[in-house]
Image: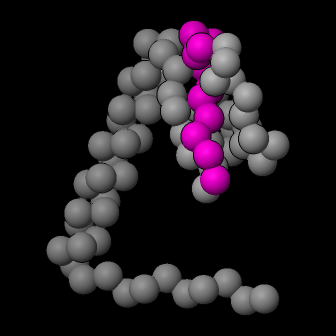
Amino acid sequence: MSEPSKPTLSPDTQAMLDCLQLAVNKTLERKRRLGQYVVLWDGNAPFVIGDDAPEHLKQAPTNATPSSSGRTG
């Protein structure tokens, strides 16, 4: 199976996407520095990463690891 090609974005749309990605990355980095957990989505269900995450939410899917999500500890 071949991977679908990415659509060509207009300059305005690309600028909006870049801005959103920057905002999310800054927020995740701030939460990491503060030692707060984050909620991520694996495509099927939400999961959490972080030492202070509620125990009943810490059941991460098998394909999700802190290194693949960009979040470490």
Residue at position x 62%, y 46% from top?
Answer: 45
From the viewer's perspective, is 64 left or right of 4?
Answer: right
Q: Quadrant of the C terminus?
A: top right
Residue 18 horizontal/vertical position (percent) = 31, 60
Asked if one can make out residue 73 in the rendered structure from this viewpoint, the answer is no
Q: Relative to 73, say whether 64 is above or below.
A: below
Corner quadrant of residue 24: top left
Q: Which residues are magenta?
A: 44-54
Q: Relative to 51, say whether 61 is above or below.
A: below
From the viewer's perspective, is 30 left or right of 36?
Answer: left
Residue at position x 51%, y 28% from top?
Answer: 38
| Farthest residue, direction front | 56
Total numbered labels: 0
| Farthest residue, direction left | 12
Residue at position x 52%, y 33% from top?
Answer: 39
Residue at position x 30%, y 52% from top?
Answer: 20
Between 29 and 58, the one lying in front of the other is: 58
Q: Relative to 17, say whether 46 is above or below.
A: above
Secondary structure mainly formed by the magenta segment = loop
Q: Relative to 24, say whether 38 is above or below.
A: above
Corner quadrant of residue 14: bottom left
